[in-house]
Amino acid sequence: MTTHDAPGPTGVLLMGYGSPDGASDLPSYLTEVLHGRAPPPEVVQEYVRRYERIGGSPQNRILGSLRTKLERRLADDGGPSRVFLGVKHGRPALRDVIPDAARAGFRHLLAVPLSPYASTWISEPYLDGVKEGVAAAATPIDVDVRLDWHLDPHWIGYWSRAIRAAREREPDPNDVVLLSAHSLPQRMRDRGDPYPEILAETSGAIARAVGGLERWSFAFQSAGNTTEPWLGPDLEDVMLDWQRKGARRQWVASFGFVFDHLEVLYDLDVVVREFAEGHGLEYRRVPMPNDSTDVVEALADRIRSPGARPGTVVASRR
């Protein structure tokens, strides 16, 4: 557990991935994602096309709404009075927000990422951003990073209720539920990243919470377009497997993400939908949690949990 030597109030830092605000932001945004390497013009144009196809990403709006709702929820319990928002890519950057919090008089921040999964692949960029921000602060500040909320009952509860409600609206005894999450390069798994095990644990918990869900599978989506291998099974392959078992209507519940963004609105609702319909399948998607009460409560739970819980990392400058 962190020992705070410097006096001062405690705030909360909500950490997101980030998104471009519009097409004009894409070149700089993609350059940052690529660690300073400018993308070729054709790559930029392809991403412009994707964002235009989905009408722009709602990610930044949802992040802002979650920040406001979490701040109100914590205040209701007499908790920290201020929630800051910082992102890995784009604005407001984590490396800038932490010095801002220090200048505002905060000496301690409890930080939680907007991903429930304490995978090295997911968590390291957040931790790097936190360390940069702490190093850049002109006054001492501690940041206690609260990772790992994939089994929070509010998180599991959202998905179980949303899956039940979706299937009840369109009952079909032969349908199937496909629980999907973003793939990652096989090399990360070879290095010992626990991501696949965390996802297996979470998908199993969701399926049990739905109750009576016998026809379901886990699958990876959104694998990168690279020559190296990515983790499978791929969602499209799993869809064809279930088609051979008689499942024409297929529900995708993208539990690997918290809210609607490019990997949901384009990778699923455009690419996977077109694939499914081209193979005579009925594509359906379970709504994302976005800024729902369940997500706010799960984040509040993680903020209130003890700092010594496994997965917690502390960065400090004194």
Image (cartoon, helix red, strand yellow):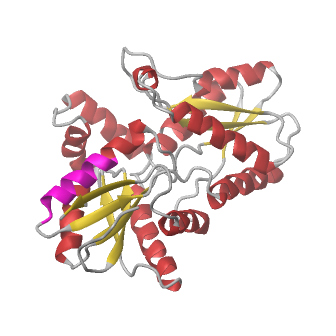
Which of 88 and 153 lies nearest the eye of the viewer?
153
User: What residue is drawn where x is 47% and y is 83%?
Assistant: 75
Q: Please state, as top left, top right, bottom left or bottom right, where the N terminus lies in the image.
A: bottom left
User: What residue is drawn where x is 40% and y is 21%?
Assistant: 187
Residue 127 place in picture, x, y as percent: 31, 48
Image vertical order of residue 38 relative to residue 298, above or below: above
Which of 5 and 56 lies nearest the eye of the viewer?
5
Res. 173 image quadrant: top right
Which of 114 and 42 lies nearest the eye of the viewer?
114
Tell me if 94 is positioned left or right of 260 in this view: left
Q: Is residue 108 magenta?
A: no
Residue 242 in sight: yes
Res. 123 image quadrant: top left
Image vertical order of residue 97 relative to residue 240, above or below: below
Tell me if 53 is positioned left or right of 295 in this view: left
Question: Main structural element of the magenta stretch: helix, strand or loop?
Answer: helix
User: What residue is drawn where x is 81% and y is 33%?
Assistant: 215
Residue 130 place in picture, x, y as percent: 27, 54
Q: Please state, as top left, top right, bottom left or bottom right, where the C terminus lies in the image.
A: bottom left
Which segment is the magenta one? 126-137
User: What residue is drawn where x is 50% and y is 56%?
Assistant: 309
Image vertical order of residue 2 relative to residue 313, above or below: below
Tell me if 172 is positioned left or right of 207 in this view: right
Q: Is residue 128 magenta?
A: yes
